Image (tube, grey):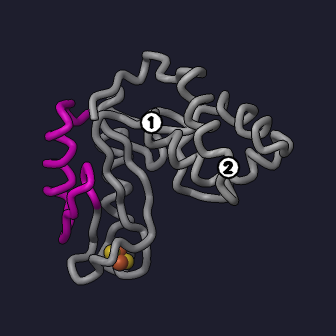
Amino acid sequence: MAMNAHHDLFDEARARDIIAGLAGLEGAALPMLHALQEAFGYVDRRAIPLIADVLNISKAEAHGVVSFYHDFRDAPPGRHVLKLCRAEACQARGVEALAQRLEAKHGCVAGETGLTGALTVENVYCLGNCALAPAALFDGEPVGRLDAARVDAIVATCGSAPK
Ligand code: FES
């Protein structure tokens, strides 16, 4: 997914359309947030009051839904997304050291877009790929048996030289 992090991706008219289209659903807040993230790559905070309006709930309530679920990004992702499993089996196989390497060597902090927009690292909790721990999803593709060399190779794929 090619995206420029410096460009404002939010389109209020489009967000309003998406929200209005789902307004009839029961428990519409969640499907709305998923649809917005699907459309824009993240949930812009400017969409929150629009949702609150349509559902006749307070902004605080709408915001509460966003922060309760960890699936929603509040900023556009990088061109590549690495979802790194931080659950038990992957912890036992050393994912922590890999996360530290991503941070210290490559400047990729989980939850932030590093490498000037090239790579977003996100934490996830069990990908069902424990047999190949430490496991991750890179741009939606499962990768297993991660080690320092593989992590470095993934970062290199993203097109920015390590620091
Ligand atoms: S604990 Fe990491 S894939 Fe299951």
- The residue drawn where x is 81% and y is 39% is 59
Is residue 39 rendered to the left or right of residue 48? left
Is 144 inside the magenta-drawn segment? yes
Residue 128 versus residue 159 in the image, above or below? below
Where residue 24 is drawn, which disc sits there? 2
Is 77 inside the magenta-drawn segment? no
- The residue drawn where x is 75% and y is 46% is 62
**Callout 2: SS:** loop
Is residue 53 rendered to the left or right of residue 47? right
- The residue drawn where x is 35% and y is 35% is 78
Query: How crowded is the residue under tag 2: few (<14 C-alpha within 10 Å), some, or many (20+)?
Result: few
Residue 89 versus residue 121 in the image, above or below? below
Q: Is residue 83 visible?
A: yes
> Mark 1 — residue?
39
Q: Is residue 90 visible?
A: no
| Range shown magenta | 137-163
